[in-house]
């Protein structure tokens, strides 16, 4: 009962957030209209305006049509495997009988189209507008399209087969996840009941809580790539706040840290200070060794580039990279392979535990420096998410950070009962719960 109550509360919270999003989206669309920018659907296209109709036809034939793969359902063929998180049209052609089809919205195409008249159109609606061109060989009285997407079980089942490497095992289970069981179906609530029943049957959606009615458009995260409009419609870009020590200093960061601990809070202050620390360490002739934990990195990561540069400059490098960072697994596997080919010693976390710590350790001459961050070493999210990084030379901290890395580097990793001793750091799963409870008390 407690679990059911918790799930219900989560569902209520999620639906509340969805309602807030819809209201905010509606308000923004209305505000854009007041500024002369409209998001138009296929129903609003006046085919008498030949210039616009020709633009849409040309754009569709040149950019969209080659990427479309319509699949006719039924006819004795097995139901196709749908890709997790991708948008599909469920299409019904109504004539003497009803013929159903599936059509994926090409994920690599821009989601929004700038029209010659200054308005904007969803790619979805251009495809709706052009359905007669896609299905021209069929005879029907009318054709309708409704969006949907599925989510598949993303849990990775890592077995205990030690005959293959961990990285090979991860690649294998990632391929298996493509066929993971569907856990929910999000669909356009205007979808006809008979179409919804058919998709639920084919996708083996059996429980009501696996069905999520939604709007006309899905994957609204694509609004992050909304076309750039006139500057007066954008918030003024905020510059990073000045760091009172680092911004005006040309002194190498480690020499600054020798004299004082530093705290960098991004995005209010620049994440570039962390990049600068790694770049300086990579070419500093007195730096012997760099160790770092990676969980999520930028797609083209300056952090990874700095690590590679350090390896090429003869530094000893150890990287603990978490291969089970959900939905970043393939990216992290690629990074791990790239680092390994450059001679970097790479560890794949501490299975079955995940390594969430964000740590850097740098040994320079007879000194040790550490960076402890609340967020990923990721310059992309460092512009969006609020996190803080502490840069320190304090031996009480650096000694214990080194113990964390010793544990991660030990391939025969001792049992939790033989945990390292920590006085100044709180490290999970080494009695962190008790430490927090003691501090609260």
Image (cartoon, rainbow, N blue to C red):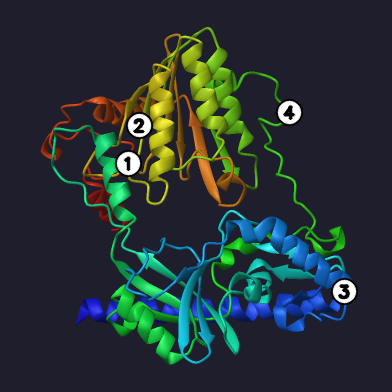
Q: Nearer the viewer, mark 3 or mark 2?
A: 3
Spatial CA distance of label 3 from label 2 is 59 Å
**Tag 4 residue:** 248
Q: Depth check: 262 or 162 in front?
A: 162
Q: Quadrant of residue 343?
A: top left
In the rendered image, the quadrant that contains the C terminus is bottom left
Q: Using the rendered image of the protein, determine whether residue 436 is visible from the camera's viewpoint.
A: yes
Q: Using the rendered image of the protein, determine whether residue 9 is visible from the camera's viewpoint.
A: no
**Which secondary structure, mark 4?**
loop
Q: Nearer the viewer, mark 4 or mark 1?
A: 1
**Tag 3 residue:** 50
Percent position of residue 234, x then y: 79, 61
Of the numbered discs 4 and 2, the one sitting upstream in the chain is 4
**Which secondary structure, mark 3?**
helix
Instruction: Please tell me whether residue 231 is drawn above or below residue 138 in the rendered image.
Output: above
Percent position of residue 424, x then y: 33, 36
| Number of the label disc, if any, that sits on residue 394 | none
């Amino acid at each position: 009962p407690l679990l059911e109550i918790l799930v219900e509360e989560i569902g209520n919270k999620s639906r509340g957030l969805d309602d807030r999003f819809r209201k905010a989206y509606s308000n923004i669309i209305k505000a854009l209209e007041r500024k002369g920018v409209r998001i138009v659907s296929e129903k609003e296209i006046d085919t008498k305006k030949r210039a616009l109709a020709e633009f849409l036809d040309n754009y569709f034939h040149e950019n969209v049509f080659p990427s479309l793969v319509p699949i006719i359902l039924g006819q004795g063929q097995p139901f196709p495997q749908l890709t997790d998180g991708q948008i599909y049209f469920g299409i019904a052609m109504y004539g003497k009988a009803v013929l159903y089809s599936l059509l994926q919205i090409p994920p690599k195409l821009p989601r929004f189209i700038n029209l010659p008249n200054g308005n904007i159109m969803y790619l979805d609606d251009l495809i709706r507008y052009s359905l007669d061109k896609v299905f021209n060989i069929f005879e029907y009285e009318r054709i309708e399209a409704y969006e949907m997407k599925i989510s598949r079980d993303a849990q990775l089942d890592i077995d205990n087969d030690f005959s293959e490497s961990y990285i090979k095992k991860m690649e294998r289970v990632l391929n298996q996840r493509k066929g993971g069981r569907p856990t929910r179906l999000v669909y356009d609530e205007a979808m006809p009941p008979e179409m919804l029943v058919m998709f639920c049957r084919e996708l083996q959606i059996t429980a009501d809580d696996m069905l999520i009615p939604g709007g006309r458009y899905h994957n609204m995260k694509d609004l992050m790539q909304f076309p750039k409009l006139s500057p007066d419609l954008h918030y003024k870009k905020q510059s990073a706040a000045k760091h009172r020590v680092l911004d005006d200093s040309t002194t190498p960061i480690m020499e600054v840290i020798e004299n004082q601990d530093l705290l960098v809070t991004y995005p209010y202050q620049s994440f570039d200070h962390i990049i600068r620390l790694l770049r300086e360490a990579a070419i500093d002739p007195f730096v012997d060794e760099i160790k770092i934990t990676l969980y999520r990195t930028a797609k083209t990561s300056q952090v990874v580039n700095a690590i590679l540069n350090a390896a090429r400059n003869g530094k000893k490098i150890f990287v603990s990279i978490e291969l089970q960072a959900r939905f970043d697994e393939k990216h992290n596997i690629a990074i791990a392979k790239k680092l390994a080919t450059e001679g970097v010693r790479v560890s794949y976390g501490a299975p079955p535990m995940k390594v969430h710590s964000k740590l850097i350790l740098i040994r320079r001459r007879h000194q040790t420096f550490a960076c402890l961050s609340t967020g990923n070493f990721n310059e992309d999210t460092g512009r969006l998410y609020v996190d803080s990084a502490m840069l320190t030379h304090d031996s009480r901290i650096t000694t214990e950070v080194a113990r964390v890395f010793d544990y991660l580097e030990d391939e025969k990793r001792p049992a939790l009962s033989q945990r390292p001793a920590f006085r100044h750091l709180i490290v999970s799963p080494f009695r962190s719960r008790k430490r927090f409870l003691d501090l609260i008390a």
